[in-house]
Every structure is written in structure tokens, then in C-alpha cells.
């Protein structure tokens, strides 16, 4: 059993004692990625979203997908990074309470521009979310006033045919 150590500086915390999102952020900072020096809401949301979509994502793959030499990231940088990781994205105007659990994990952008990562719905009305550098559980009624747009992601499948079987059957 490891002793319960206290750290005066969060940067001194060993990587094995951090949560996965914090661990990924620390690795990006140690790798010299400029945007992660002052990790803002978009950078931390990007890490949380990548880990929600692919918990086994390799660090080198993530580093190769990041935009080069940016001081900070925004929505387009997040979407471009996920596209380079092999995800299609679709934007839909919706409120969080209207979200179906089949759409998780997804990125929800509130009207004020704040990103929220909707990770999973647990039970009827509880949602696991990542917001403001924090992983938490919120009830739908706590998020009832949140309007904005959701961005849902689907992984690119190289073996998936470009047309449906019905279209292919009609062309013969």
C-alpha cells in the first residue's frame, strides 16, 4: 500500500496518482505543447473528450493530431484534432435535457461558448459531465436551463460501405 503523501504543488504529483484527464494534461505540458502551458477550458475539454471516446488513445497519436504551435485552442481546433483522430462530427441545436443517452459521449457548447463534455447518462436523470476542469455528476434538472448545440461524434470505419445496401441493390 502506498503512503498517503501530500504535495505542496499539483505539478509535483506523480502521474500514477492523477486522474486520466489530469494525467494527459500533465503529459502534454511536459511534452512542450504550447497551448497546454496555461491549460484553459478548451484544452482540458479536448483531453476529456478524447479519453471519453477512446480511453486507450496513445499519447503519440494524440500529439500528432494536435494543432501545431498554437497559444490556445478553440472549438475549431478541437474538431480538427478529433477529425485527425478519425472521428466524424455533426452539430445539432438541442438542450441537454433533450439529449438521448445513445449520443454520449458528446461535446455540448452552451450559448455563452462554454464547452461541456457529456460523458454518459447514468440512470434516468443523472449525467456524468466534464466542465471547468472537473469531472462530476449532475442531474438533468441542474442542466435544464442549458441551451446550445451538441456535437456528436462517430468513428470512421474503413470497412463500412459508402452507400447503403438498399442503394446498392437498386443499382443492379
Image (cartoon, rainbow, N blue to C red):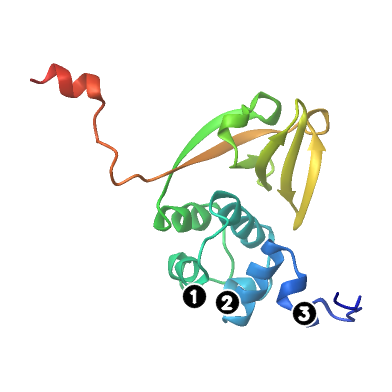
Query: Could you tell me if the residues under marks 1 and 3 are in contact, i.e. CB atoms within 8 Å?
Result: no
The label on residue 69 is 1
Query: Could you tell me if the residues under marks 1 and 2 are in contact, i.e. CB atoms within 8 Å?
Result: yes
Mark 2 neighbour density, 10 Å: few (under 14) some (14–19) many (20 or more): some
Q: Which of 10 and 41 is in front in this view?
A: 10
Q: Which of 115 and 26 is in front in this view?
A: 26
Mark 3 or 2: in front is 3
From the top left corner, tell me how far across and down residue 82 is, in percent.
47, 54
Q: Where is mark 2, residue-wise?
A: 34
Of marks 1 and 2, which one's residue comes earlier in the chain? 2
Of marks 3 and 2, which one's residue comes earlier in the chain? 3
Residue at disc 2, secondary structure: helix
Q: Where is mark 3, residue-wise?
A: 11
Mark 1 neighbour density, 10 Å: few (under 14) some (14–19) many (20 or more): few
Residue at disc 3, secondary structure: helix
> Which residue occupies the extreme top position in the image?
170
- Residue 14 sits in quarter: bottom right
Mark 1 or 3: in front is 3
Amino acid at each position: 500500500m502506498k503512503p498517503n503523501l501530500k504535495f505542496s504543488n499539483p505539478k509535483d504529483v506523480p502521474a500514477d496518482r492523477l486522474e486520466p484527464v489530469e494525467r494527459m494534461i500533465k503529459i502534454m505540458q511536459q511534452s512542450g505543447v504550447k497551448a497546454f502551458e496555461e491549460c484553459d477550458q478548451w484544452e482540458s475539454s479536448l483531453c476529456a473528450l478524447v479519453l471519453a471516446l477512446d480511453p486507450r488513445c496513445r499519447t503519440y497519436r494524440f500529439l500528432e493530431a494536435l494543432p501545431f504551435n498554437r497559444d490556445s485552442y478553440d472549438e475549431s481546433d478541437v474538431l480538427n484534432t478529433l477529425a485527425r483522430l478519425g472521428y466524424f462530427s455533426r452539430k445539432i441545436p438541442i438542450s441537454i435535457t433533450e439529449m438521448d443517452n445513445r449520443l454520449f459521449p458528446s461535446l455540448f457548447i452552451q450559448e455563452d461558448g462554454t464547452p461541456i463534455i457529456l460523458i454518459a447518462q447514468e440512470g434516468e436523470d443523472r449525467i456524468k459531465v466534464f466542465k471547468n476542469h472537473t469531472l462530476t455528476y449532475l442531474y438533468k434538472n441542474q442542466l435544464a436551463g442549458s441551451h446550445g448545440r451538441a456535437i456528436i461524434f462517430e468513428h470512421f470505419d474503413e470497412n463500412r460501405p459508402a452507400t447503403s445496401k438498399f442503394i446498392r441493390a437498386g443499382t443492379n
